[in-house]
Image (cartoon, rainbow, N blue to C red):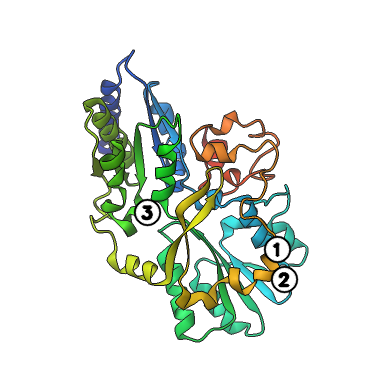
């Protein structure tokens, strides 16, 4: 009886042959980077790195929003969780991320009695706020452009419903400024990008045109199936070998040239750009988002300014942890002396081992 996936397997085999044809023995080495945590996990699960020619190096970049949140911001979240009358409502990925001190996480604070609950979206916080009108519901708004529209919708709904006991800690990041900073850094050495499909569904193809147009770097917006990723790698290698950089959209079934105008409008109505710190990269000009003055009443940074005073946004990295270098593509998980020994998913030293989109978590699980 023929294999159900025989046609798919044949396509994958032909793709791998085409990739190997572009990289014969002795050819120039090519370094590609994916900047999406879902890509990181999909690549690990499918064993794609092991299938590629030795001349192709596939690195993970700053594509995990939890991971790029610096230790100091985690310290701020931890401090807010201790504030009397506060219920901290957070995504599940944030629960075990340590701050500047190893072992100090929301999970540890919750075990000690802090009021911390897991939500699936910012909108869930509004139900909590109405259920507990005598409590302050604080939501650490972590994410890229993918989750920003949903957070913006929750803030706008809170204003419309006159919910006064809800606020967000604005930790949202924008991808383009961080990629620009990496490309401008000395010895970065990446020759092509697999652009994040989820972010591109919001900001569209135009959000990544700067890569070939300004930096002459090949770029492909990729989907998340193994076939998507291999097609995207093949397209990047084809561009690199031809010497002609462009933006290609492999994920046309979900990404339009103009993106999602309604989501962009929602995001731009509620948020404005600001300089913000990224773990491992430092201060990124225009790399974050905060609430516009119209919605400042829902900004936990202002509402709890006295509580957060003196807590640096950068914070301190846990000794030995190399998450910051891994997020820049300057190291891989096995370069870290803590990986798999002093740092495991059960006892993480850094966020790259904690998040379901973290590079170290993917390497530990699949490599």
Q: Which mark is residue 83?
A: 2
Locate the N terminus by quadrant: top left
The residue tagged with tag 1: helix, strand or loop?
helix
Q: CA distance from mark 3 to mark 2?
A: 35 Å
Q: Are marks 1 and 2 in contact (CB under 8 Å)?
A: yes
Q: Secondary structure at mark 3?
A: helix
Give percent across and percent down for residue 354: 60, 48
Q: Which mark is residue 198?
A: 3
Location of residue 314 in the rendering, given as x and y in whole percent from the top left corner: 62, 51
In terms of depth relative to the viewer, which is nearer, 201 or 271? 271
Vertical arrangement, residue 170 with respect to residue 21, above or below: below
Which residue has dot 1 on it?
79
Mark 3: few/some/many CA within 10 Å (<14, 14-19, 20+):
many
Q: Nearer the viewer, residue 45 or 307?
A: 307
| Foreground disc of the pair 3, 1 | 1
To which quarter of the image does residue 129 belong? bottom right
Query: In the current view of this chain or complex, which residue is farthest to the right?
Result: 112
Q: How much space separates mark 1 and mark 2, taking CA atoms?
A: 7 Å
Q: Indicate which disc, 3 or 1, sits on the residue closer to the N terminus.
A: 1
Q: Is residue 146 above or below residue 237?
A: below
Q: Are marks 3 and 2 in contact (CB under 8 Å)?
A: no
């Amino acid at each position: 009886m023929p294999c159900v996936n025989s046609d798919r397997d044949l396509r994958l085999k032909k793709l791998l042959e085409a990739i190997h044809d572009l990289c014969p023995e002795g050819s120039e080495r090519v370094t590609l980077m994916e900047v999406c945590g879902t890509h990181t996990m999909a690549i690990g699960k499918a064993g794609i790195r092991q299938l590629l020619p030795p001349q192709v190096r596939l690195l993970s970049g700053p594509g995990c929003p939890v991971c790029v949140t610096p230790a100091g911001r985690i310290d701020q979240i931890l401090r807010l969780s201790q504030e009397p009358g506060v219920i901290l409502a957070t995504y599940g990925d944030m629960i075990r991320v340590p701050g500047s001190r190893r072992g100090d996480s929301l999970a540890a604070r919750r075990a000690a009695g802090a009021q911390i609950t897991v939500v699936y979206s910012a909108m869930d916080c509004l139900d909590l706020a109405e259920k507990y009108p005598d409590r302050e519901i604080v939501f650490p708004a972590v994410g890229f452009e993918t989750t920003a529209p949903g957070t913006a919708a929750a803030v706008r709904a809170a204003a419309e419903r006159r919910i006064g006991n809800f606020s967000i800690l604005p930790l949202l990041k924008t991808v383009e400024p961080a990629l620009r900073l990496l490309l401008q850094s000395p010895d970065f050495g990446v020759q092509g990008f697999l652009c994040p499909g989820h972010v591109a569904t919001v900001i569209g193809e135009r959000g990544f045109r700067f890569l070939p147009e300004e930096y002459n770097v090949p770029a492909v917006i990729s989907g998340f199936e193994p076939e998507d990723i291999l097609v995207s790698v093949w397209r990047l290698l084809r561009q690199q070998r031809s010497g002609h950089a462009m933006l290609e959209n492999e994920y046309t079934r979900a990404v339009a040239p103009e993106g999602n105008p309604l989501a962009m409008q929602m995001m731009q109505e509620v948020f404005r750009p600001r300089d913000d710190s990224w773990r491992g990269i430092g201060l990124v000009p225009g790399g974050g988002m905060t609430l516009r003055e119209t919605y400042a009443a829902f900004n936990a940074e202002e509402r709890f300014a006295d509580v957060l005073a003196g807590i640096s946004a950068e914070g301190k990295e846990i000794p030995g942890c190399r998450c910051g270098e891994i997020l820049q593509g300057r190291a891989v998980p096995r370069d870290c002396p803590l990986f798999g020994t002093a740092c495991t998913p059960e006892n993480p030293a850094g966020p790259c081992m904690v998040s379901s989109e973290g590079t170290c978590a993917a390497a530990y699980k699949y490599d």
